[in-house]
Image: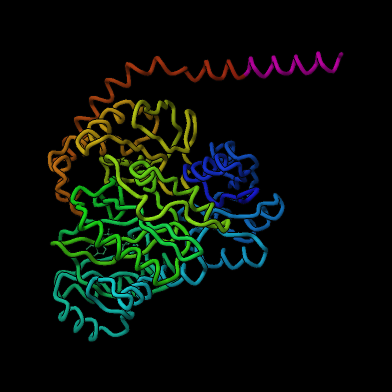
Amino acid sequence: MFNKVLIANRGEIAIRVMRACRELDVQSVAVYSDADKYSLFAKFADEAYSIGESSPSKSYLNIDKIIEVAEKSGADAIHPGYGFLAENSRLGKECEKHGIKLIGPSGSVIESMGDKITSKKLMRSAGIPVIPGTDKGISDIDEAVEIAESIGYPVIVKASAGGGGIGMRTVYEKDELVRAIESTQSVAASAFGNSTVFIEKYLEEPRHIEFQIMADEYGNTIHVADRECSIQRRHQKLIEEAPSPIMTEDLRERMGSAAVKAAESINYANAGTVEFLYSNGDFYFLEMNTRIQVEHPITEIVTGIDLVQEQLKIASGKELSCSQKDISVTGHAIECRINAENPLKDFSPNSGKITGYRSPGGHGVRVDSGVYMNYSIPTFYDSMISKLIVWDRTRTAAIDRMKRALSEYVILGVKTTIPFHKAMMRSADFRAGKLNTHFVDEHHKGITEEMEKVVIEDKERWNRLKSTFLPQKKVAAITTAVGSYMNNVQIQQKEK
Ligand code: ADP
């Protein structure tokens, strides 16, 4: 096992990785930007180093600086978390040059899976069903029109290097196609530095179902069951659950085997996720993410496997600690992403100081968070501030537990997605498991009305709770008193 791991990330995932390190008796090293000087994760690590200015390009994406800190601190491995450098093949190459182990797959795997056209081609040749569409970039508009006609409208124009739901346009008729291609190309060029776009069939009411994969360096590959992530806004996930409400033993066997085959076909080693769209009884490969996912805790809870510990063990050259027959799913887990966003204003990002904070607890509740009372949320990074995860024996009981946990979650000072999640837990269609990726748009009116009610209820309840938070003035007075006491102690010690 490693002695020391540098975590090239921030927020809740940095803390999550540090927890796994601590349990394995591995030292952890945090790197933080100027904006994260007072972040919880920087305090949580065994060692912490400043790596530069707040903008990601000057800190969390600065590979040379991160390698320099890894060498200086004596870290023998780097965990990239998700986002930032997690799917950057250069990080792997630089690590190799400097004799540092990257807790992730090889650079060539990252490159081929990070490109949607290449990954679809590879999967098709491995016999995995893929969504009908082109397997090369669009170079000519006449050709694009021909392809779209042969697939049949609606189609979706996607950036090959795309991610995070960015760079996708749905096209319902020929007249919209040229404009959609041009606009997707320009978004792709500015967001990903690569303007290649392609066309595939737009599935109208699909469910997003994905499989967790674990594979070691000795060719052992297993799936750690499924998650459903159909509750999305702007093609980004908001609520995830495990297992999918429609999962049967037969479907899990078929989809799970396809996911394992996908990973085996590229000699994958690490934790990963094979994402599928499921529609009318058929499933299609969507993409493979070659890293730990945001929503990994729900899988951990229903299977009992610590996925981050497994990642560390695999990267340090150990074999998988379990085989496929050891994997079984118990009960139901749900994760709500708590983002600093205003769900009543089209999920617009929100930042500011958390003036009151109380996180939920009790049986079957897990909170993976990177924030605390009086913490100021920086504007430079993504808006997720914590993840609320619950477990219970059945899906209905898990929804009720989530309702209870959400009612305990108090975050004052910034707008969050809590009202959205509360509204969702009350939705009859959500409770019935009638999900598809358009759920949030299709239920917009009902969810908004429910959120408006929630906001009024919360305001009344939180006003009552306010007195239980220490007023700001008192906090300042206590800090000053403790400071002067410590000073006195030091003076007395010196005098002695
Ligand atoms: P990204 O890599 O940007 O996250 P994905 O290809 O993983 O993009 O897709 C994200 C989401 O976009 C999916 O979960 C789904 O909601 C929607 N989507 C993508 N492709 C299609 C498609 N062909 N038909 C319908 N929805 C799609």
Q: How many marks?
A: 0
Q: Nearer the viewer, residue 317 or 186?
A: 317
Residue 40 x/y as whole percent: 53, 36
Q: Quadrant of ligand 1?
A: bottom left
Q: Residue at point 67% right, 63% down?
A: 99
| Vertical side of 322 occupied by 135: above or below | below
Residue 47 seen in the figure: yes
Please give left or right for residue 57 compared with residue 288 in the image: right
Query: Residue 265, located in which quarter of the rendered image?
Result: bottom left
Instruction: Say which residue appears at 39% left-offset and 34% top-offset.
Output: 366
User: Relative to the observer, which residue lies in front, 278 or 451?
Assistant: 278
**Secondary structure mostly seen in the magenta stretch:** helix
**Rendered position, 22 above or below 287:** above
Residue 25 vs residue 293, the one in the foreground: 25
Magenta segment: 480-496
Q: Which percent across, then down, holds residue 346?
A: 27, 46
Image coordinates of residue 471 in percent, x first then y, are 47, 17
- Can you name the residue that lies furthest to the front here? 325
Instruction: Say if the magenta span includes residue 217.
Output: no
The residue sitting at 28% across, 55% down in the picture is 234
Is residue 55 among what the camera can see?
Answer: no
The percent coordinates of residue 187 (x first, y second) are 36, 67
- Quadrant of residue 192 within the rendered picture: bottom left
Residue 487 shown in magenta: yes
Looking at the image, residue 487 lies above or below residue 26: above
Q: Is residue 322 left or right of residue 156?
A: right
Query: Residue placed at 41% from the left, 39% from the top?
Result: 386
